[in-house]
């Protein structure tokens, strides 16, 4: 099921369900005379829910670490979708991953029901929902029967009041990681500890990368993808093709990445690369597991990418990153760093993510189309320099 289909279903069915659950949750809380002030010693089970976006899970790592430090005796469960499950299990910040499978309306509903029963078994004292727009996430929160249910609101609280016991304004003008940390503070966590980092095996230890002849620091990664949650984040393939042609002509080895479902789209860029330079291009889309993908990002001389999950992963892995922004706001991600360069055109309607339900351009992403190939090439040169091993 595509993300935009999920969003439509969420809006059609989520609001009426929440309208029913809100007064029921209030009544049940009043009848049971539930006490919402909890001491650290009383917290034995915490659930954090985030269903969509590996990049968001990367941004949530400091928050998860803060919760784990502040409540060391509590079991920390991450409730997520099957799309994010593999990465969630690798995070290392949580004790348990509970998965809802996205497999059509009835499959998702059945899986959600199973997750609710498991949540009842976990008996969480704190349920922290870090989705912003998902009404489904709020429904799962109230069905968990957690004593304290935390969540975000964007413009109005009326639909979530009652279902959630604690609401925090989602300030889209703040970095996402800081927004998540503010939620942790609201839940009583101390957030002054070190920020966790991702790691991955060296390139030489991954069989698929060795078979492709890759060596640490001697190739560039180009990610032409963005999830179907907002495909307007994609830079045109023909421009990616011209950029790759220029980089390959300089003698650089260029590696293309993507999931198995993204492989056909990635293959489309090959037709825009000059034939004489295709020998320097390796397409690994659909050929790597998660460990291999993280390793190829970690070992790259530079990662050039759209605003997407691989951008977040590459930065957390310590790679040097050139990111093309359009609908999104680079300030929102807080990557103000010497190894992170943003290329964008500040057109009138950019950024529109988090501000509108549909892009004002209707899919004609002029904010991305106006980014010139030479601009991206020049930005990459700061990190790329001369070809490794050249005279």
Image (spheres, helix red, strand yellow):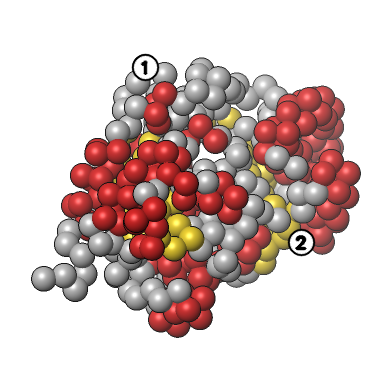
Choose the circle earlier in sequence order: 1 or 2: 2
Q: Quadrant of the N terminus?
A: top right
Position above or below: 229 against 86? above
Q: Nearer the viewer, residue 190 or 227?
A: 227
Question: Residue 179, located in which quarter of the rendered image?
Answer: top left
> Which residue is pictured at 63% across the width and 64% down the height?
86
> Which residue is pictured at 51% across the width and 32% down the height?
232
> Which residue is pictured at 83% across the width and 37% down the height?
28
Circle 1: element type = loop
Asked if residue 119 lies left or right of residue 304, the reply is right
Position above or below: 367 against 294? above
- The crowding category of the residue bearing disc 2, from other C-alpha atoms within 10 Å (few below 14, some 14 to 19, many at least 20), is some
Q: Tell me the residue that label 2 is attached to.
A: 122
Image location (x, y in percent) of residue 245: 33, 50
Residue 348's disc number: 1
Q: CA distance from mark 1 to mark 2?
A: 48 Å
Q: Residue pushed farthest left?
A: 391
Asked if residue 26 lies left or right of residue 356, the reply is right
Question: Residue 358, located in which quarter of the rendered image?
Answer: top right
Q: Quadrant of the C terminus?
A: bottom left
- The crowding category of the residue bearing disc 1, from other C-alpha atoms within 10 Å (few below 14, some 14 to 19, many at least 20), is few
Asked if residue 30 lies left or right of residue 214, the reply is right
Give the total of numbered labels: 2
Q: Nearer the viewer, residue 5 or 391?
A: 391
Image location (x, y in percent) of residue 54: 55, 52
Question: Residue 279, located in which quarter of the rendered image?
Answer: bottom left
Image location (x, y in percent) of residue 80: 67, 53
Q: Is residue 196 visible?
A: no
Q: Is residue 346 visible?
A: yes
């Amino acid at each position: 099921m595509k993300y935009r289909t999920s969003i439509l279903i969420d809006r059609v069915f989520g609001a009426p369900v929440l309208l029913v659950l809100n007064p029921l949750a209030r009544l049940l809380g009043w009848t049971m005379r539930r006490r919402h002030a909890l001491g650290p010693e009383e917290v034995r089970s915490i659930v954090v829910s985030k269903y969509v976006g590996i990049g968001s899970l990367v941004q949530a790592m400091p928050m998860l670490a803060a919760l784990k430090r502040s409540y060391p005796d509590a079991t920390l469960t991450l409730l997520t979708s099957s799309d994010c499950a593999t990465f969630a299990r690798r995070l290392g910040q949580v004790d348990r991953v509970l998965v809802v499978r996205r497999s059509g309306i009835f499959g998702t509903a059945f899986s959600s029901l199973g997750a609710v029963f498991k949540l009842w078994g976990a008996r969480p004292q704190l349920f922290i929902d870090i989705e912003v727009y998902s009404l489904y996430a709020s429904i799962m929160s109230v069905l968990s029967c957690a004593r304290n249910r935390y969540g975000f609101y964007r413009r109005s609280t009326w639909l979530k009041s009652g279902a959630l016991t604690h609401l925090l304004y989602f300030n889209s003008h703040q970095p996402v990681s800081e927004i998540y940390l503010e939620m942790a503070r609201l839940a009583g966590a101390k957030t002054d500890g070190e920020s966790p980092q991702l790691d991955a095996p060296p390139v030489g230890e991954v069989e698929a990368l060795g078979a492709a002849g890759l060596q640490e620091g001697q190739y560039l990664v180009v990610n032409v993808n963005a999830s179907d949650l907002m495909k307007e984040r994609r830079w045109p393939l023909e421009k990616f093709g011209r950029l790759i042609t220029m980089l390959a002509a300089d003698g650089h080895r260029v590696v293309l990445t993507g999931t198995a479902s993204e492989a056909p789209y990635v293959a489309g860029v090959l037709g825009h690369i000059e034939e004489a330079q295709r020998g320097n291009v390796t397409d690994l889309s659909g050929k790597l597991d998660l460990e291999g993908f993280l390793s190829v990002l970690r070992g790259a001389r530079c990662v050039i990418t759209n605003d997407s999950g691989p951008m977040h992963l590459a930065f957390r892995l310590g790679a040097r990153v050139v990111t093309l922004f359009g609908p999104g706001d680079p300030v929102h991600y807080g990557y103000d760093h010497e190894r992170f360069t943003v290329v964008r055109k500040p057109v009138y309607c950019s950024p529109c993510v988090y501000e509108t339900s549909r892009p004002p351009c209707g899919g004609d992403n002029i904010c991305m189309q106006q980014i010139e190939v030479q601009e991206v090439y020049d930005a990459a040169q700061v990190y790329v320099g001369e070809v490794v091993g050249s005279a």
